[in-house]
Image (cartoon, helix red, strand yellow):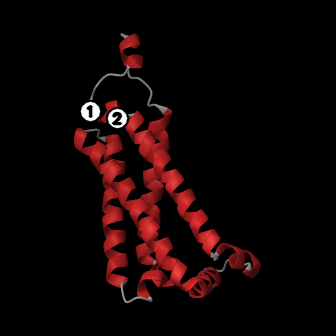
Amino acid sequence: MATSRPWLWWFLVVFFLWSVGKDFQLMITHQRGVDFYIFDQRGWSGLFFAFMSASFLLDFGASFALFRPSAKGFWVCLAALALGMVYNVIALNLALSDLEGVKNAYIAGRELRGFPANLEAATRIFTPEGIKASVLVSAFFGLIAIGAVIVIRQYFFGVPSQKDEDAV
């Protein structure tokens, strides 16, 4: 009899599939995005695409690994999460050096997509404190996902959990 998937598995499936979509969208619409602006203003657009390509491939690999578990998949999931955290820290630290430009790129990007841009909210977000809070929030979610991968590691290595042994 087949057992149901643990809820953390479902959380990771949604997390990694969302990340694949986000990475793909950032690569396709890069000229409208704040992330690209942060790197391009320094002449580092190649680094942006290197990060996005590696992130896309690792997130896609992690999504695949959740459906086809193996020991390598465990490490792919951790690598995808680690790269995402490194990227967020680098991008947000780079944003600190040009907060006004980043804010303007954010507002322009929202308007290009037809979304309203609240100048007052953007002014509060694009402050050193707002960027530092963003780093903390993104690190928090990254650590939660790493914890989820570690908790369900037996899924990747084929070691039966206590729940599986009780079912026999």
Label at residue 153 = 2
Quadrant of the snapshot with the N terminus: top left
Relative horizontal placement of residue 10, taking residue 80 as reference (left or right): right
Contact? badges 2 and 1 (CB < 8 Å): yes
Q: Nearer the viewer, residue 133 or 118?
A: 133
Residue drawn at the location 57% of the way across and 85% of the way down: 105
Which is more toward the observer, 27 or 78?
78
Q: Is residue 119 left or right of residue 135?
A: right
Q: Which residue is mark 1?
A: 157
Q: Position of residue 125 (x, y in %)?
A: 66, 73
Mark 2–mark 1 Cα distance, whole angstroms, equals: 7 Å
Residue found at x 34% / y 49%? 78
Residue type indicated by callout 1: Phe
* Residue 77: % across, % down: 34, 49
Q: Write the residue at 52% across / 83% down.
A: 97
Under mark 2, the amino acid is Arg
SS type, badge 2: helix
Q: Say if 8 sits above or below 141 in the image.
A: above
Q: Position of residue 165 (x, y in %)?
A: 36, 14
**Residue 145: % across, % down:** 46, 46
